[in-house]
Each structure stands twice: as structure tokens, then as C-alpha cells.
Image: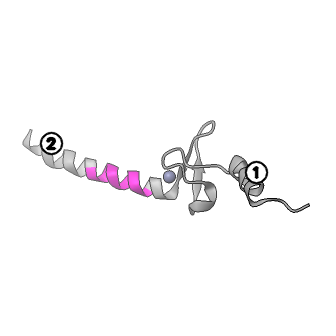
Amino acid sequence: MPESAVDRLRGTTRSLKQCSFCEKTQDRVRRLFSGIRDAFICDECITYYYNAMAELDRAEAAGGDKR
Ligand SMILES: [Zn+2]
């Protein structure tokens, strides 16, 4: 019995882990890291938030001197 593409996709989607931040599934990212319970973060989000954090730190450091 041939498995339909939709059924296959459903089955895959259900078992696939996905990033809790951008909701990309495991197969659409290079790496997916698991947190507690069902929380996950992908390599793209780690890079994004890491850069965002560095940006904030720089902004705070720059603004902090003037305050
Ligand atoms: Zn992500």
C-alpha cells in the first residue's frame, strides 16, 4: 500500500522536533538544541540572539558611561 505524501508528512511533522523560537523543524536547521521539557532552540536562533545580546551589551556599555 503506497503511503501518501500527506500521511508521510503528517507522521514526520508529528515526530519532528522544532525550534521554540522560530518554529523551524529539525530537518530545516543545521542543529537543534533541547532545553527542558519540549523547549528547543536552533543554531540560527542561537546566532541571532547571541548577536542581539552582544548588540545590547555594546549599547548598554556605550550608554552606561554617559549615565
Ligand atoms: Zn530557531
Which residue does the numbered mark 2 point to in the structure image? 64
Measured from the top left, where is residue 3 in percent x and y?
83, 59
Q: Quadrant of the N terminus?
A: bottom right
Depth check: give the residue in front, 20 or 14: 14
In front of the other: 1 or 49: 1
Relative to 18, is 56 on the left or the right? left
User: Marks 1 and 2, how far apart in space?
Assistant: 52 Å
Q: Is residue 17 left or right of residue 4?
A: left
Q: How many marks?
A: 2
**Residue at horizontal 26 percent and vertical 48 percent from the top:** 57
Which residue is identified by label 1? 11
Q: Residue at x 53, y 44 (%)?
A: 20
Camera-side residue of 64 and 8: 8
Q: Which residues are magenta?
A: 47-55
Q: Earlier in the sequence, mark 1 or mark 2?
A: 1
Dot 2: what SS? helix
